[in-house]
Amino acid sequence: MTLTPAELTSAVSGGIGTSPQRPDGNLKVRGEFAYASDLWHEDMIWGATLRSPHPYARITSVDITEALQVPGVYAVLTHSDVPGRNLYGLEHKDQPVLAVDVVRYQGEPIALVGADHPETARRAMKKIVVGYEVLEPVVDMETAADDTPLHPGGNLVRHVPIRRGSQDVAAEVVVTGRYEVGMQDQAFLGPESGLAVPADDGSVDLYIATQWLHVDRSQVAAALGLPEEKVRLTLSGVGGAFGGREDLSMQVHACLLALHTGKPVKMVYNREESFYGHVHRHPAVLYYEHGADRTGKLVYVRARMYLDGGAYASSTPAVVANAATLGVGPYEVDNVTVDAYGVYTNNPPCGAMRGFGAVQAGFAYESQMDKLAEALGMSPVDVRVRNAMTEGSVMPTGQVVDSAAPVAQLLKLVQDKPLPAGTSSDLRELPGGVSNTTHGEGVVRGVGYAVGIKNICFSEGYDDYSTARVRVSMVNGSLAAAVHTAACEVGQGLVTIMQQIVRTELGIELVTVLPMDTTIGNGGSTSASRQTYVTGGAVKAACALVRDRLAGRTDIGDEVIDETTEWRHRATEAIDPETGQGNAHVQYGFAAHRAVVDVDVELGLVRVVALDCAQDVGRALNPQAVVGQIQGGSAQGLGLAVMEEIQTSGGKVRNPSFTDYLIPTVLDMPPMSIDVLELADPHAPYGIRGVGEPPTISSTPAIVAAIRAATGLALTRVPVRPEHLTVT
Amino acid sequence: MDFLRPETLAEALELKASRPDAVPIAGGTDVMVELNFDHRRPGALLDLTRVPELRQWSDGLRIGAAVPYARIIDELGTALPGLAMAARTVGSPQIRNRGTVGGNLGAASPAGDTHPVLLASDAVIEVASTRGPRMIPATEFYLGVKRNALEPDELIVAVHLAPAAGPQQFAKVGTRNAMVIAVCSFAISLFPGENRVGAAVGSAAPTPRRAHEAEAFLAAELDFATPKPLLDSVKREFGELVSRAASPIDDVRGSAAYREHALAVMARRTLGWAWQELLSRKNRGGEQSCA
Ligand SMILES: Cc1cc2nc3c(=O)[nH]c(=O)nc-3n(C[C@H](O)[C@H](O)[C@H](O)COP(=O)(O)OP(=O)(O)OC[C@H]3O[C@@H](n4cnc5c(N)ncnc54)[C@H](O)[C@@H]3O)c2cc1C
């Protein structure tokens, strides 16, 4: 039996602006959807990865002799078996496919085993003998740049300065703060998995759960020393991504084993390995100073931020740029001084995660706005509204915001929502839940607000485009369409959106979404809230070409109309390396939250009672999916606020499991009241504005503000722990 | 790996005697995790789910080791409120449908939720082998981190627990509002007829532990015959003594200092709730006899 990704067809009607069923919805709900971990191929063998137990060590020897002798083992590979370039990376090629003479993080891959059974592979792996000379790890992001260099160019990955207006202006009211953000994990539910199938001509097919097929392909081909056309990728069922699949995990490894053994090779990480197998959200330390006049108008913002990229660069440069350029938040500030630093350490590598640099800055600048409100005796909403940016405002980069920026309106919408009833007597609605820690004792309510800003699509001059192919032919006497892209469906619902766009553009109800693969051009990354915008734009453009050829016909006989096109959003610019000035971003998204919390101040336990949100989405192509994104993004922000953190000690992960890495359950996440604004962006297809990330940014600071309101504590670090709340 | 499926207790004990390496499996909610994580590679699994003697409870109370939490909550909530409260905090509905008190005892994790209740309520653990049965008081059952008093050929058969003689409470701190392992936990049982209180802490020492001094303090301090509202100072002192009974560590789930603090708070609050219940029972009883 061979199980590979299937075509998704659904006969439901529904163009844009409606919420038709997902073509993969029923399969997923019934547990019948084939995820990458379900891939199967006759005669396949299993791959396993030997990883470093040390955050920083010199490798003195690797002995694979005994492992090779285990019956059932087909291959044991090390760096010397990598035929092409043994270095990859999204922005800097600095990460070895397999470690050579040094390991820079706990979990770094050193060797691969291919065997007839996963158990055999694991056993053989334990027989590989690696000699280590353990080194003192670099773990402090604030001093890393001056510490032992972990890479040839030193430990500073990128410094982004922003200089706007006066650099030494004074203000009547000044608040300062130091904030910390812990390392959050994407915690997608489907762990990394893939299947590599070798072909007779030395080429390879890789079925993989990823976020970006083409960039995977170019990195895999380079490592394998193959031309790109000899590496074919097909997207497999993806169980969530949130940024964590933008970097390679086992892509090269599985292909190496397959080409080496001539057999199909499957690899699946378990949850623990998954924690070592993908990048996380950058932990950060942020220093801020806000100056305002007595009316609450911001005079200046100065910030210094450190983002810990861990052992390899991944997307650190872009994350740092986001933190810097979005570092003052959705506010008008004439005088800005920002220095954001992304550094190498021996902590786990960090890269893309929903919110991408804007989350870390958001927690800090929103905490500062509350501090400012307090210093001024203003309400948190008033001080924000006083400084809220609008269409036409100028960013710290000098970029003019040239579409809707309804920051004040979003804040007022959440402020005007009815407040929830008083503290409940139902255990499930109290802090601690059915753990029965309070019947109301010690419970204090607090309310907090936050608003955030996120760039949508890729920035800084990146050629950000997508490719779409739309094919129309007759099926059972009616027109039917098929849409083909390489844009990854990771659970967000792009498959539905593409169907809706084709239905609207062509008036054809039956739309089949073909498997996403590299037989078509680049679809770009499923990140930066960009796929509906960019791939949606490409599908719309391909439909226009098809429509011209259809010329109103509803019967085209045996003709097949097949059009492929590339579509790109308007260009952005690099920012000036000294002043940070430039039109770096293509679009901005905004969301605001009001959080209501009950805090058991004696036990330090929190229950988020309400987490209401208002967001402008330009145009809701699929209203239900929009609300789903807002709920999910808000929940992920709740996780960062009160529970989610990969705890490290000396570079080692202390909680690589869902037993101790906690994500919110249905009893932690309240039902939400959500207002969706549709203020069309004239530059975007259908006027849409990216949806997925903005709610993740404002959710966290709103909750922490509410906890501060309940407790009176400063709370400068997320996630907030019971220890912080009880000062123990 | 062999999968042994006895149909009776006698057969199960025979199998365990002949295969001491066989790992018993009831709900499997601990065993399967260990197998999946490759922490354990037993030669055989001994499935207890088909043994009727282990799947029932009888008045008195004798609760079969393999009765799942969901049934304890549904069927024994009135007789054993403390155990039912603890059962209600275990994992998720799926885990409560499968997981058992016998499994909690078998795993003997210091964080197991039923342990403080069993200790505070004077439970006795019935174990057996082909050599015969043994009755082990809960206080003697927990020997160390994930170590209990079972011999290699023994199985846990049942837990003996008298129906609650008075109010009982259980509370557990976790950093999530459901599906969370205890950072620390606490159970209290009032025995009004005997003028005493049972109290025990979980997840705050290498084993679950009874808080003897705290119990003795309340036995001396409280008047069960003519109960009056509790003084804050009594609750406070009780909390302090409970937290002193613990010897917690710092770990990923919480700091030692926080655990000590939280135990004191939980002890104070649960004592307050239990005592309040006792007072209102007395009041109701008083009203009835007047009428
Ligand atoms: C997602 C999840 C959440 C969880 N949450 C909690 C929680 O909140 N609180 C909590 O306390 N626990 C929790 N657990 C742990 C587990 O569910 C409990 O310890 C449960 O009581 C185990 O019962 P079981 O029947 O499934 O045990 P099993 O897994 O079948 O067995 C556990 C151990 O006991 C032994 N054993 C079982 N029955 C017997 C017997 N009759 N005689 C001798 N030995 C026996 C087994 O050999 C094994 O060593 C959780 C587990 C999971 C997977």
Image: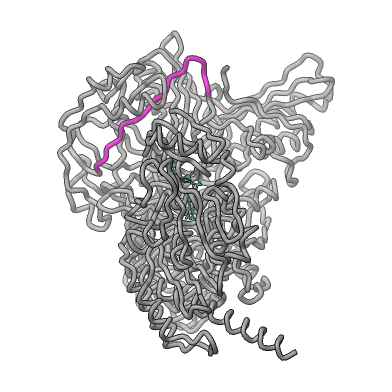
Residue A413 percent coordinates (x, y): 65, 68
The mark total stands at: 0
Q: Quadrant of residue A19?
A: top right
Residue pushed farthest top?
A200
Is B250 located above or below residue A30 in the figure?
Answer: below
Residue B239 percent coordinates (x, y): 40, 78
Is A565 located above or below residue B128 in the figure?
Answer: above
Q: Is any atom of residue A325 visible in this view?
A: no
What span is colored magenta in the figure?
A: A40-54
What's the residue at 74%, 29% (across, down)? A547
What's the residue at 71%, 29% (across, down)? A9
Residue A531 percent coordinates (x, y): 57, 40
Q: Is any atom of residue A407 visible in this view?
A: yes
Is A67 located above or below residue B127 in the figure?
Answer: above
Residue B114 percent coordinates (x, y): 48, 59
Query: Magenta segment: does it hold A111?
Result: no
